[in-house]
Amino acid sequence: MAGERQRSHKEAVSKQANKAKQMIRSGVIQSPHGTRFTVRGQVTTLPLPIHPPFRLGRKWTSR
């Protein structure tokens, strides 16, 4: 059950990141200072001024 939860969380995270990437590409989100972090090895730039990237990295890449 825990494995399922982790997998669905990973899927949700990647879906969120893809949506944000699309919005940045289309210009909906203007990110003057995008925070860089990796989602499954891809460096993603998201406008997250509140969350420091090291917390995101540790939280998202932990298995």
Image (cartoon, rainbow, N blue to C red):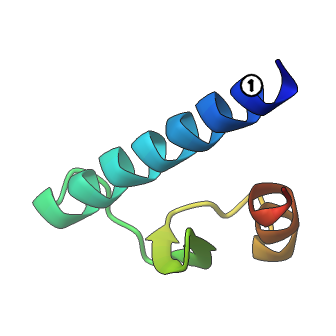
Depicted 22 relative to depicted 36: above or below: above
Few, some or many residues within 10 Å of mark 1 (<14, 14–19, 20+): few
Is residue 33 visible to us here? no
> What amino acid type should be assigned to the residue bearing mark 1?
Arg
Q: Quadrant of residue 53?
A: bottom right
Report the residue marked by disc 1.
Answer: 5
Q: Residue 39: image x %, image y %?
A: 56, 67
Q: Is residue 12 left or right of residue 61?
A: left
Q: Tag 1, which secondary structure?
A: helix
Which residue does the image show at 82% across and 18% down from the upper left? 1
Which residue does the image show at 32% across and 45% down from the upper left? 19
Q: Is residue 26 left or right of residue 23?
A: left
Q: Residue 9: image x %, image y %?
A: 66, 34
- Number of marks in the image? 1
Q: Is residue 1 left or right of residue 31?
A: right
Depicted 8 relative to depicted 44: above or below: above
> Which residue occupies the extreme left position in the image?
26
Depicted 41 relative to depicted 51: above or below: below
Which residue does the image show at 32% across and 60% down from the upper left? 21
Q: Residue 15: image x %, image y %?
A: 41, 41
Is residue 28 visible to us here? yes
Between 43 and 35, the residue placed more toward the observer is 43
> Which residue occupies the extreme top position in the image?
1
Depicted 38 relative to depicted 14: above or below: below
Which residue does the image show at 85% across and 60% down from the upper left? 62
Between 23 and 16, the residue placed more toward the observer is 16
Q: Quadrant of the C terminus?
A: bottom right
Q: Residue 34: image x %, image y %?
A: 51, 75
Q: Quadrant of residue 7?
A: top right
Between 8 and 21, the residue placed more toward the observer is 8
